[in-house]
Image (cartoon, rainbow, N blue to C red):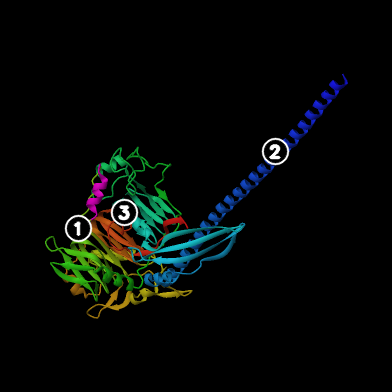
Amino acid sequence: MQKARVAVDRRRQQRGVTAIMMTFVISIVLVAIAAALVYILTAETREVGYRGQEKQALYLAQAGIEKATTTLQSSIESYYATTLDVILTLEMIDCQVGTYPASEEALGSGTFTVQITSIEVPAEFDRRNITFRATGSVGGVTKTVLSVKTFGFSASKVFDSTYFINNYGWFYGGAQQFQGDVRANGNFVVQGAQKINGDVYASGTIDESAGSFFYDSLDRYYTTASTRARPGDPPAPGEAEFAGGYDGFADGYDSYGDPRDTETPQQHPDQDVVDMPYLGDLDYYQNLAIEENGTVKIDGATIINNNYTGTVVLVGTSTSPIVIDGPVVVSDDVIIKGVVSGQGTIYAGRNVHIIADISYQNPPSWPKPDYDPEDTADENVDKDFLCLSAKGNVVLGDYNHSGWAVVKDYIQPPFTSAYAVDATDAGNGYVSYYSDGTPYFDGNYTDYDGGAKSDGASRKFYESSLSDTQFSSYSPTIRIDQIDALVYTNHLVGGRVNNMNFNGSVIGRDDGIAFTGSLTMNYDYRVREQGREYVNINLPLSVMDPEEVSWREE
């Protein structure tokens, strides 16, 4: 009995030792597991923190890119505003290679540094592709990105409209139709009922107290608009959207009521001013003419080879049209009429005088409705296109004719007013006075400009440099009824026309166009691509908004 009890006690002791050992082992395992979990959690926390710092560093690098972009763009705009010289501005941009627009700038819990590592000239030589290398740093973690952006020049936004006036916009009397947007950097006043198949923009007020704007529904536009007017948006019923086309503001058009749709208003008063570029020093355009070997020929003879000194007279016919190829520059006046072929821009150092009809030998056409607009666009790429750009004025018709006298009421104060001009306009007499160091013209285009005609007679701003006898010998008319061209001028677009069809755009600082009968302006849809991607017409330039070409992490 005694022995049996001892054996039982021993077994109990052995089981206790075993339990203690198992508990000890389990404890060690649990401690090991806990340690492993702590390690894993700590490592994951570190990883999460590291990844978070990486993301912050990447954001900082991108913030550096945006800061550098804004800084450089501001410098370009300020420099060009001071010099009004494209070439000098491009040279200023080229000098930025190797510079640091930002260096160890703090933001939040980190910093960023940006360097301009390279500057390249793309296909458009008035632009620059700039590579920014930006590094963001947070807690010892860094991220670096490379961003390539395009800076430089493009055609101004003033070319988005069929009618753009830098000062006072006015549509008075008669039947007027504008197939495209219209804009004034001042007040807009309308008298009578005027059709605007587009938007109306004004940096001031839009006054309809003595008249009103109206427009067509899209269905009506399909059936009534000329093939010279821009396509619809969509170009045909049921088709896809077509950017830049006329979108028809009122589907429920009522010719006896007000067709405006309050959800998509036609009128836009109190808009920001759109900066209008000056044709300043013509050196840039003269170099451009040489670079692109611009010419004007008539009947096989070269009239202008890149650059022309003096006043040139260009008269084209259906059998011997004025053939333009690229940009050309004329130092004084351009006297022009007749049939035009080719694509290009004529820059005049003073006035452009359109003395009779100008028509394209091979004009573009935008059928309505159009179920194949892309093919139509391709067909129109090579059609004729003329841009007439004047450092002085664009004058329409025979200014010596008695019927032209009515124009004078609209080209002098109080109808016009003083405005700031470019210092290089002094050579054409436009610097009337200075205010705080800025040159101003008093707005009186009927005054003498300080120059002389070819016979020595005093010359007025709206007159050409030819003597009156010479000017009359080219048979100018008071009844111009068609102009195929984009017209741009530093100063006045003015003159007398009759039942006019203007296929292109009118862009100037003052409007002095007086008409009898009717006036129709058809926006040339090809200009909306800034005259560079669509047709190479070399429009006057403004500083472009930066465009991103590529972005990647290094």
Residue at x 60% of width, y 59% of height: 140
How far apart marks 3 and 2 lie (CA) works out to: 99 Å
Q: Which residues are magenta?
A: 371-381
Specify whether residue 314 is painted magenta: no
Left or right: 253, with 439 as reference point? left
Q: Main secondary structure of the magenta part?
A: helix
Q: Where is residue 66 shown, x and y percent of the image?
A: 50, 59
Q: Amino acid at mark 1?
A: Tyr
Distance from Cα at disc 3 to Cα at disc 1: 29 Å
Q: Nearer the viewer, residue 488 or 36?
A: 36
Q: Is residue 469 above or below residue 238?
A: below
* Residue furthest to the right: 2
Q: Is residue 419 visible?
A: yes
- First in residue order: circle 2 vs circle 1: 2
Q: Position of residue 188 (x, y in %)?
A: 40, 55
Which type of secondary structure does the marked residue at label 3 adopt? Answer: loop
Sequence-wise, the earlier of marks 3 and 2 is: 2
Mark yes or no: residue 400 visible: no
Is disc 2 placed on a helix, strand or loop? helix
- Residue linked to disc 1: 360
In the drawing, what numbered circle is on residue 173? 3
Tell me, for residue 29, which label it has, or none: 2
Residue at 38% of width from left, 58% of height from top?
157
Residue type at mark 3: give it: Gly
Q: Nearer the viewer, residue 23 or 249?
A: 23
Marks 3/2 in contact by CB < 8 Å: the verdict is: no
